[in-house]
Image (cartoon, helix red, strand yellow):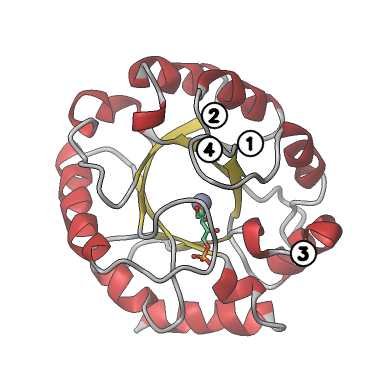
Amino acid sequence: APQYRIAPSLLSADFARLGEEVKNVLDAGADWIHFDVMDNHYVPNLTFGPVICEAVRKHAFKPDGTPAPLDVHLMVQPVDALALAFCRAGADLVTFHPDASTHVDRTLQLIKGEGKQAGLVFNPATPLDVLEWVIDKVDLVMLMSVNPGFGGQSFIPSALQKLKKAREIIDKSGRDIRLEIDGGVKVDNIREIAAAGADTFVAGSAIFGKPDYRAVIDAMRTELAK
Ligand code: DX5
Ligand code: ZN
């Protein structure tokens, strides 16, 4: 079975208690912290920048004391200056939307050059074609199963077919590339999302919308183990 990762999205956390929220969700068994950067230009919402990432970095440790990977999802345009700023603000993985970057290969090289993992994010209607020529520079592929901009939206079912296609492309490449899904992931659909090929799951409202984070994460792992 794949090594599954659960990445709670801070978008649905209490921003006034961000450090505590990060600690609580990692104590509850989260693997990564998903950090949604929105600029009111590429998406119709505004969240946080590199200084908040730097602040979160100081609280993002697993119960055993090891640093938890910060998965920074850039929904911004232009991409490059902020990609660089987040690499330097403690991101471990930086993902961006290829349609937001003028030179996708260059942006990937920029992130890799900072020693970080790089990923491409595909909106529900965006084809995967661009992967063909840059797959050697990609560490992670993320599919959006909602239109980016807001938490708490419903999973778009066509993402399941698209996951199967992305899984084929990744397996054919022979490279160690994670396949992440973002949007509308819940306890009751995570199993079929995994069956379609995802190995990494962003979940915002499903986790932060409940009082007991551990109960949700445990329930997700139980589904994944079925
Ligand atoms: C949407 C963000 C997601 C979002 C997921 O633009 O990229 O990460 O927070 O939230 P839920 O899990 O509530 O759909
Ligand atoms: Zn996201």
- The residue at which mark 2 appears reads as 116
Type of the residue with mark 2: Lys
Residue 45, percent from left and from top: 59, 47
Instruction: State yes or no: discs 3 and 1 in contact (Cβ < 8 Å).
Output: no
Of badges 2 and 3, the one in the foreground is 3
How packed mark 4 is, by other alpha carbons closer than 10 Å (few <14, some 14-19, many 20 or more), is many
Q: In which quadrant of the rendered image does the C terminus lie?
A: bottom left
Measured Cα–Cα span from mark 4 to mark 3? 20 Å
Identity of the amino acid at label 3?
Asp
Which of the two discs, 1 and 2, labels the residue nearer the N terminus?
Answer: 1
Check disc 3 and report the residue beneath it.
14
Residue at 54%, 29% in the rendered image: 116
Q: Which residue is mark 4?
A: 74
Rounded to the nearest whole Å, what is the CA distance between mark 3 and mark 1?
20 Å
Work out how far the residue at label 2 is from the one at label 3, CA to CA, in angstroms: 28 Å
Q: Earlier in the sequence, mark 2 or mark 3?
A: 3
Q: CA distance from mark 4 to mark 1?
A: 11 Å
- Looking at the image, residue 209 lies above or below residue 180: below
